[in-house]
Image (spheres, helix red, strand yellow):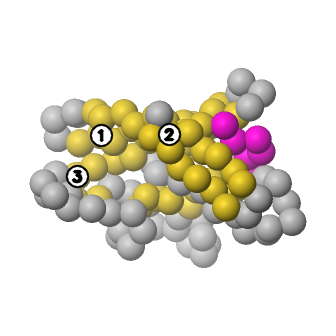
Amino acid sequence: MNVLARIVYHLADNNSVRIDYGVWLDARIRFETLDVGDTRELVLFLQLDSDKPELDVLEDRRDLNSHFSEPWSWFRTEEIANLASVEVTLIETESQTKHVFPLEIRREGPIFRVVSG
C-alpha cells in the first residue's frame, strides 16, 4: 500500500505548521510502499546548526509527473522554533485509511526525546 505522511508541528506559542507530505528516507517519491510488518524512517525535523534554536522541517514536493529544474526544489523547507509536539498522520492512498500518532518532543540539551503521546 502507498502511505503518505502528513505532519503537524505544534509550537509552544499555540501556533502550528502543517506539512502535507512528510519526507521518507530513501523514498523515490513522496509516498512509501509498506507491507504488514515493514518499517520505514520518516524525517520529523533537522537541526542544521547546533548554535541555533530553530529546527528545519521538510515537505516532499516530488510527484510522479513533475520535474524540477533546480537542485533541492523537490523539497520545501521551513524553520520552526519552540517545538512542543508533533502529530503524524499516516494515510493509505487507496482506501484513505488514516492512523494518527501524537508525539511529544522533549529537548535535553543537544538530545531530542520523542515520546508517544
User: Over which residues does the magenta segment extend?
Assistant: 79-84
Residue depicted at 30% across the width and 35% down the height: 99
Query: Principal SS element in the magenta part?
Result: strand
Locate residue 95, reporting x and y percent.
16, 35
The residue singled out by tag 1 in the image is 91
Residue depicted at 36% across the width and 68% down the height: 27
- Near mark 2 (Cα within 10 A), the count class, few <14, some 14-19 or many ≥20, is some
What kind of element bears circle 3? strand
Determine if residue 27 is in view: yes
Locate residue 44, reporting x and y percent.
54, 54
Looking at the image, the residue that sits furthest to the right is: 51
Residue depicted at 17% across the width and 41% down the height: 94
Between tags 3 and 2, which lies in front? 2
The circle on residue 103 is 2
Nearest the eye: 63 or 84: 84
Mark 2–mark 1 distance (CA, rounded to whole Å): 17 Å
The circle on residue 39 is none
Q: Quadrant of residue 112?
A: bottom right
The circle on residue 2 is 3
- Amino acid type, callout 2: Leu
Mark 1–mark 3 distance (CA, rounded to whole Å): 8 Å
What kind of element bears circle 1? strand
Mark closest to the chain's N terminus, 3 or 2: 3
Q: Quadrant of residue 50?
A: bottom right
